[in-house]
């Protein structure tokens, strides 16, 4: 029976290695973590087979941030089912307690600050935009729609690379857009876009997005919208996008709070070899979390407030 145990153990290691290779070779993983530093990778199964990846933006740690991405596997692809960016905190570890993610974060100032927050699945976050937290209740609209079977605006958030939205206006698709409207304001840390019609053998048959803009309508904090001295109730923020001329899943850092609407607008295209309609296959929206709003945990540590005072001499000393 010992040989059977060893065989099972070997097969387990092989399966895990294959899964790790599949994940790291997936379209979204490669593009998301290429420029960033991975801080941890953890496997879990509280909502099917998933992998939780923590990452840190490159740059000065004192002003840095990071985030987590939960990857879930569809029939043939690993895709980001949930993501969150932490404001001025870097994720260092995660533990899974049932359906709760216990995330250890660090902030670097004069001394490191450690903070622990808990996110509960189906309460604080959900997958595939199916729940109420934080992006579940939304509506998707398009400036135009190609009259072709299966083409819908909602396809950009259906967690399926084989479906897509295509504009139906005259011309190449420049200035056409897809708009995601939220029932109430949400915080957005990052936006991912899969341009073109991904689920076909000949990707270049149709127009693909070359450049574009992410436009966000921002609702002012409560109380300010009633201030008659303000000239407007909503402001708008923009982020430029650029895509390579190949199948890709590009992510853009936005870090905005109180977002009422998110528009992805086409400003330039790669022309298709056969068709003149521009496609977008999928849009991913990551949460933006401020860890300071979470209650302190016993594991939290903070630098000594009076560290500088300790270095000063007492009164009367020479």
Image (cartoon, grey):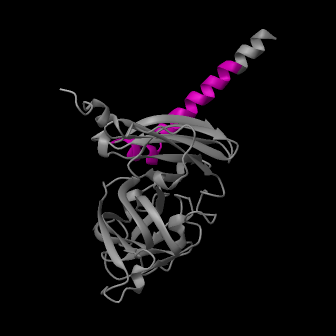
Q: Is residue 173 visible?
A: no
**Percent of width and height locating residue 14:** 61, 25
Comparing 223 with 118, the one in front is 223
**Percent of width and height locating residue 99:** 68, 47
Task: Indicate whether residue 305 is drawn in magenta.
Answer: no
Task: Indicate whether residue 12 is drawn in magenta.
Answer: yes
**Magenta region, residue range:** 9-35
Q: Residue furthest right?
A: 1
Q: Residue at x 36, y 67 (%)?
A: 274
Comparing 201 with 5, the one in front is 5
Q: Residue at x 55, y 51 (%)?
A: 295
**Percent of width and height locating residue 310:** 31, 32
The quarter of the rendered structure image containing the N terminus is top right
Count of labels in the image: 0
Q: Is residue 152 left or right of residue 65?
A: right
Q: Main secondary structure of the magenta part?
A: helix
Q: Is residue 132 above or below residue 55?
A: below
Q: Residue at x 43, y 81 (%)?
A: 144
């Amino acid at each position: 029976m010992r040989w059977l145990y060893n065989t099972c153990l070997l097969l387990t290691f092989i399966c895990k290695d294959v899964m790790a290779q599949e994940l790291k070779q997936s379209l979204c993983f490669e593009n998301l973590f290429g420029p960033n530093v991975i801080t941890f990778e953890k496997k879990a199964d509280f909502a099917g087979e998933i992998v939780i990846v923590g990452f840190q933006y490159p740059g000065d740690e004192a002003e840095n941030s990071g985030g987590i991405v939960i990857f879930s596997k569809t029939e043939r692809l690993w895709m980001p089912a949930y993501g969150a960016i932490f404001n001025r905190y870097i994720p260092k570890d995660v533990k899974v307690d049932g359906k709760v993610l216990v995330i250890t974060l660090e902030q670097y100032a004069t001394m490191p600050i450690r903070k622990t927050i808990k996110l509960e699945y189906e309460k604080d976050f959900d997958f595939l935009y199916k729940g109420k937290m934080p992006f579940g209740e939304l509506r998707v609209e398009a400036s135009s729609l190609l009259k072709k079977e299966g083409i819908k605006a909602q396809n950009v958030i259906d967690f399926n690379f084989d479906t897509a939205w295509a504009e139906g206006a005259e011309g190449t698709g420049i200035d056409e857009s897809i708009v995601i409207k939220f029932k109430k304001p949400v915080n957005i840390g990052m936006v991912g876009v899969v341009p073109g019609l991904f689920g076909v053998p000949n990707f270049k048959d149709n127009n693909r997005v070359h450049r574009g803009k992410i436009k966000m309508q921002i609702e002012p904090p409560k109380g300010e919208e009633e201030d008659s001295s303000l000239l407007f109730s909503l402001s708008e923020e923009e982020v430029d996008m650029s895509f390579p001329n190949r199948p890709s899943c590009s992510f853009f850092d936005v870090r905005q709070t109180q977002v009422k609407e998110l528009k992805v607008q086409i400003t330039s295209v790669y022309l298709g070899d056969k068709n003149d309609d521009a496609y977008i296959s999928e849009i991913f929206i990551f949460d933006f979390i401020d860890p300071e709003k979470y209650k302190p945990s016993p594991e939290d540590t903070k630098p000594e407030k009076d560290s500088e005072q300790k270095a000063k001499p007492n009164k009367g000393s020479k």
